Image (spheres, helix red, strand yellow):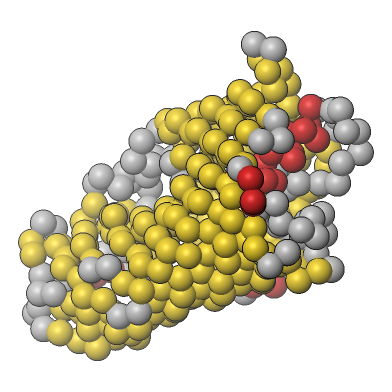
Amino acid sequence: MLKKILLIFGIGIYTFVTKAQTKDSIPDKVRAIIADKFPAIRVLNLEYEIVGGFKYASKYLNNPLPKGEVQNMHQANASVNVNLMKGKKWTLGTHVGYRRLSAELLKPDLNTQQMNLEKQDYHYHHESLNFTYYSRLFGKMAIYSASLMTDGSEKGFERVRGMLMGNLVLKATREVQMTLGVVGLLDPSALVPVIPTFTYKRQYQQGWVVDVVLPKAVYLRKTILGNGRASFGSELDNNTFYIYDFAGLSSVQIFNQMNLNSGLLYEHNLGRSFIAMVKTGMRNSLRSRISEKNKSQNDFIYEASTDPSFYFNAGLSFNPFAKKRVN
């Protein structure tokens, strides 16, 4: 399945950062900022995550169910980012991702409400094709992107969506980088169609960095051990997969869960373009819902609230254009 998915072209929100050819060009200046803000965007990224057990309360069609328990959960993630074509003021890139989630849980039967022990295994793939154009607006650098995205499960493709994005670079110096933007979602399941974005990065002495990427993450970072970087903060993470024959329904349902992961992150440049990563902390689920795949998440049939849980994530990425020293 993974081999088949890796042959599919798709769109990412941000374009992969390529090697600079003209130091004074607008695209290369902007790419440097994006690479600094989103270090996870690399050619190849592999991750494995373990989540500790937790209890949850749920409702089906607004009717409360007995409390359930997830005894253990783990997932594997893989993603590929490739720049397909580029000009002086534009780039065309693709992003392909795959996730496999496995869990053991005690859950109530929707009809009898008796507790059953179940093993669940889900596959989710997502692809995107992204066109980005670099220009100037009000005398400042601007980035415009249009994306076409697909996703699905081991049974095939389920949805096609779109995204439009604009970013204005307000400041870009060695010490401070700041952008302001907006994202428009062409997706009937989106909670809101338009999302404002703001990024701010400030470098201080002795390797300290404040890194804010709203609405995604807030981190305080510190360069350590020469080629290492430790970070403390919080980051939003979305978990999605498709469900078939849920409660006897013939329509395909989609599970959407938004988590807030808070804790420690450590990255280390191993040389030869490889970067290792470990992160751990507490996970709080902000929203867990099941709805029909082409309907709004507000029109849900199932909702759950979970207790906080411990998580541990380890990963390895490959980036041929990564700096030997993490700044």
Q: Which residue in the rendered view is the most extreme toward the top? A: 138
| Residue at 28 percent of width and 55 percent of height | 287
Q: Which residue in the rendered view is the most extreme toward the bottom? A: 117
Q: Is residue 118 left or right of residue 155?
A: left
Observer-nearest residue: 325 or 282?
Answer: 325
Residue 5 visible? The answer is no
Please state the horizontal and vertical placement of residue 167, each as a whole percent of the image: 59, 28
Please state the horizontal and vertical placement of residue 303, each as a whole percent of the image: 21, 59
Quadrant of the image occupied by residue 243 = bottom left
Give the total of numbered labels.
0
Q: Is residue 247 left or right of residue 273?
A: left
Q: Is residue 97 left or right of residue 217?
A: right
| Residue at 77 percent of width and 33 percent of height | 29
Q: Is residue 1 left or right of residue 246?
A: right
- Is residue 320 depicted above or below 174 in this figure? below
| Residue at 61 percent of width and 23 percent of height | 170
- Is residue 238 depicted above or below 274 in this figure? above
Residue 279 visible? The answer is yes
Please state the horizontal and vertical placement of residue 46, each as a whole percent of the image: 63, 70
Observer-nearest residue: 28 or 298?
Answer: 28
Quadrant of the image occupied by residue 14 = top right
| Residue at 67 percent of width and 46 percent of height | 36
- Is residue 102 depicted above or below 304 in this figure? below
